[in-house]
Amino acid sequence: MGMIGEFKEFISRGNVVDLAVGVVIGAAFGKIVTALVDGIVMPAIGYVTGGVSVSDWKYVLKPSQLDAAGKEVAAEVAIKYGQFLQTAIDFLLIAFVIFLVLKAYNRVRKPAEAPATPEDIVLLREIRDSLKK
């Protein structure tokens, strides 16, 4: 079997296709949750905090330097932790929603049937039980 044949076999396996579908759906799902965070959750947090966007939160180590004309001579040095908080909230919401979806999926999914016990094991158990008596 040549390389083309091996590649066809690799691609035709269900796991590869399932993984590809999962990645595409996961990316789309991430965009939905990001829109939820950016459009609903963060504005609500901004409203509670006085209209300041969370992504704009920062700790200024050194303010920017302006000259007499008002032009910026030296840029501000700041630790911008707001964007990190927004991304962390985004991640937590995505993880929580995925948890809820998987929990619902597992509830709906039929339980897997237990595989049948091999006949030799059944016979050995019967022998064991009869010896106990």
Image (cartoon, grey):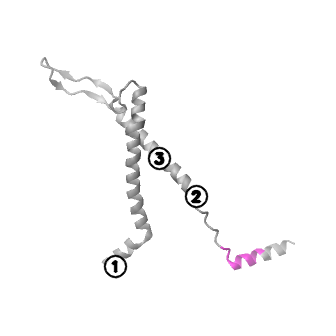
Question: Which amino acid is tagged 1?
Answer: Gly
Pointers 2 and 1 in contact (C-beta within 8 Å): no
Q: Pointer 3: what residue?
A: 95
Which is more toward the observer, 28 or 55? 28
Drawn side of residue 124 relative to residue 73, left or right: right
| Farthest right residue in view | 133
Q: What's the magenta region?
A: 116-125
Verify whether residue 120 appears in magenta.
yes
Q: Position of residue 72 (x, y in %)?
A: 17, 25
Quadrant showing the N terminus: bottom left
Identify the mark at residue 5; answer none if there is no mark: 1
Drawn side of residue 124 relative to residue 111, left or right: right
Q: Pointer 2: what residue?
A: 108
Q: Position of residue 61 (x, y in %)?
A: 30, 25
**Is 4 located above or below residue 69 in the figure?**
below
Verify whether residue 5 appears in magenta.
no
Question: Which amino acid is tagged 3?
Answer: Ala
**Is 84 located above or below residue 65 in the figure?**
below
Q: Position of residue 118 (x, y in %)?
A: 67, 77
